[in-house]
Image: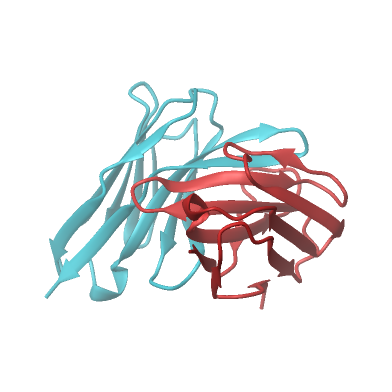
Amino acid sequence: DVKVTQSSRYLVKRTGEKVFLECVQDMDHENMFWYRQDPGLGLRLIYFSYDVKMKEKGDIPEGYSVSREKKERFSLILESASTNQTSMYLCANSRAGTPTDTQYFGPGTRLTVL
Amino acid sequence: GEDVEQSLFLSVREGDSSVINCTYTDSSSTYLYWYKQEPGAGLQLLTYIFSNMDMKQDQRLTVLLNKKDKHLSLRIADTQTGDSAIYFCAESRLTGGGNKLTFGTGTQLKVEL
């Protein structure tokens, strides 16, 4: 059974704190993605990675950075959390190459920044 | 530009058909997808259609694609309470080493008894 785990289901942080969200997959997939989900806006891509140590900006990278030191782990970092980063964060992964390879999603982390 | 739009809410009675609509703008999209998100869970792929197809049927699900109008729809026959969820359409483009998806805003489907 494929598995995508995210480090926390719920997280509460204060403005200005550094926040780490971790995602781990056991599928040996090359591609990993971080999205945020907000009501009425759907999912928006923050960053993605096609290989270890590689990263590319998505549609809304401002205020975020990522790290991919190992194939199975993709971390999202909020250097200095702000209230407008309160959101649901979803991690996904897929095999490299063909569009029919679906993205597998984790259960999400609901982050609240006070 | 990339923009994928859906209506936010749809309410149907159990046993009726549901039709969820989506419009997209990127004519170079190769595949279009429908994902389902149940409460408290991540997204799960329901079905996809290649851009040179008009229709795809998979049990209770029918996907219709009008490429000229850039309109995609998902029809769920005999809708059940277990179909209550948020449904996202997504379009794909191959970039760099992989497949990048642009998601719509999501349609919340509520099935009433």
Q: Which chain is red?
A: A
Q: Is residue A81 left or right of residue B77?
A: right
Look at the picture and state if A98 lies above or below A34.
above
Q: Residue at x 66, y 41 (%)?
A: B99
Q: Position of residue B84 (x, y in %)?
A: 28, 68
Q: Residue at x 58, y 36 (%)?
A: A59
Quarter of image, res B105: top left
Q: Colour of chain B?
A: cyan
Look at the picture and state if A10 lies above or below B90.
below
Look at the picture and state if A103 lies above or below B71.
below
Q: Residue at x 72, y 48 (%)?
A: A65
Q: Position of residue A76 (x, y in %)?
A: 69, 57
Look at the picture and state if A30 lies above or below B84.
above
Q: Is residue B60 left or right of residue B78?
A: right
Quarter of image, res B113: bottom left
Residue B78 visible in rendering: no
Q: Nearer the viewer, residue B58 or A66?
A: A66
| Colour scheme employed for the rendering of this structure | by chain
